[in-house]
Amino acid sequence: MSKVSVEIPDELLEDLDEHVGDDGKFVNRSDAIRASIRKTLDQLDEIDQRQGRLEGEE
């Protein structure tokens, strides 16, 4: 698995940390970020599909 470094504003990281850990929805920050990326890409695919911009669509 590849590693990626990103800069994240402190307030966004603080919000993310509220959802990570024993009482959170995610095991760790990496898990939360991967889930967020997947969800965002799925949403973009849905938008592209509605707009007829997906490859192979005619």
Image (tube, rainbow, N blue to C red):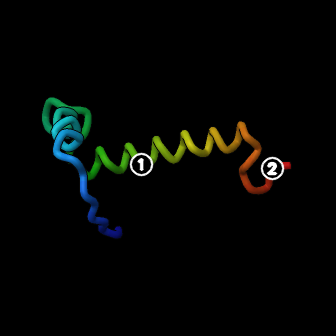
Give me the residue at 79% from left, 55% from top: 56
Residue 54: x %, y % from top left: 72, 51
Q: Earlier in the sequence, mark 2 or mark 1?
A: 1
User: The residue under label 1 is which amino acid type?
Assistant: Ile
> Which one is nearer the viewer's eye here, 23 or 18?
18
Q: Quadrant of the N terminus?
A: bottom left
Q: Residue furthest left?
A: 22
Question: Residue extending furthest right?
Answer: 58
Determine the image quadrant of residue 12.
top left
For mark 2, what is the residue? 57
State the image coordinates of residue 33 (x, y, percent, origin top left): 32, 48
Percent of width and height locating residue 13: 20, 44
Residue beneath the point at 70% across and 42% down:
49
Please, what secondary structure does the residue beneath circle 2 have?
loop
Percent x, y of residue 6: 28, 60
Location of residue 52 with respect to 22 vertically, above or below: below
Q: Secondary structure at mark 1?
A: helix
Near-viewer residue (38 or 7): 7
Quarter residue 52 falls in: top right
Q: Residue at x 24, y 51 (%)?
A: 8
Disc 1 crowd, CA 10 A, few/some/many (<14, 14-19, 20+): few
Q: Residues within 10 Å of mark 2 (few under 14, many from 20)?
A: few
Residue carrying label 1: 37
Amino acid carrying mark 2 in the image: Glu
